[in-house]
Amino acid sequence: MAVRLGPIILLLVLVTTTCADDSSEAVPSSTTTTVSPAPPTSTTAPTSTTSGSPTEPTAEDPTEPLGPGGIGAVRVGDTVTELTTRGLEITVADCEVPYVRFGQDGLIALRLAASETDVGETVIGMYVWIDERNDDIRTAEGIGRGSTRAEVLATYADRAVERTVETELGGADLRIDVADEASGNLMVFSFDEDDMLALIRVGEPSAIESPYLCA
């Protein structure tokens, strides 16, 4: 007696193919971040807070070194209106974080707080990534791109406080805090796993506690 196997074989092939496809789905794995986050990239198109067509940044490179009170024309306590009046371009990128540009490449993110008066939002902190974008930005003591943990410790000596802070994302912020008694502001130097300087934060301590802009 002849047995027709064609339909049965076809059904088995379809079932086998479907199972193989289901088993190949990737399962997301959790990771632990130990390096400070990178600045907004060009994949996210910033939206200018000023009206008119997009233009090249008009602000000149900072004429003053980075310190606990800010850098160049960007100072802790300034209002957004004051910054734009000085020719600084304020733009918004990931997580609606505002930042300013220096020259063609310099990039500094801002922490803003609503003012108790009608002057608008006020700068309470700044995040400066130590990479090719901010290659020329340095502190008054010469700390900047290429600096190591050991160099920061030696430079600020008894003012430097080493800390390893667990972050809200489960990583570790390897940092050195340098307080400014006169202003009450703080400078925070964060490092990567090779003890190379990765991020400098300046401003009010509570405003720059987290290394993550979107936290």
Image (cartoon, helix red, strand yellow):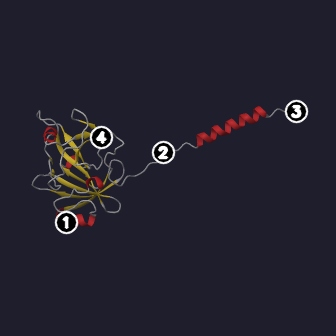
The mark found on residue 2 in the picture is: 3
For discs 2 and 3, the disc positioned in front in the rendered view: 3
Q: Quadrant of residue 64?
A: bottom left
Label 2 vs label 3: CA separation?
50 Å
Tell which circle, 2 or 1, labels the residue nearer the N-terminal end.
2
Residue drawn 19% across the image and 44% down it: 58
Label 4 vs label 3: CA separation?
71 Å
Q: Which residue is mark 2?
A: 28
Secondary structure of residue under mark 4: loop
Label 1 vs label 4: CA separation?
34 Å
Q: Amino acid at mark 4?
A: Ala
Tell which circle, 1 or 3, labels the residue nearer the N-terminal end.
3
Tell which circle, 1 or 4, labels the residue nearer the N-terminal end.
4
Is disc 2 in contact with disc 3, using a CB cutoff of under 8 Å? no
Q: Which residue is mark 4?
A: 93
User: Considering depth in this image, is 81 or 32 the residue closer to the camera?
Assistant: 81
Is disc 1 in contact with disc 3, using a CB cutoff of under 8 Å? no
User: Considering depth in this image, is 50 or 53 the residue closer to the camera?
Assistant: 53
Q: Amino acid at mark 1?
A: Thr
Tell which circle, 2 or 3, labels the residue nearer the N-terminal end.
3
Q: Amino acid at mark 2?
A: Pro
User: Considering depth in this image, is 102 or 159 the residue closer to the camera?
Assistant: 102
Is disc 1 in contact with disc 4, using a CB cutoff of under 8 Å? no
Is disc 2 in contact with disc 1, using a CB cutoff of under 8 Å? no
If the image is split into quadrants, where does the C terminus sit? top left
Tell which circle, 4 or 3, labels the residue nearer the N-terminal end.
3
Secondary structure of residue under mark 3: loop
For discs 4 and 2, the disc positioned in front in the rendered view: 4
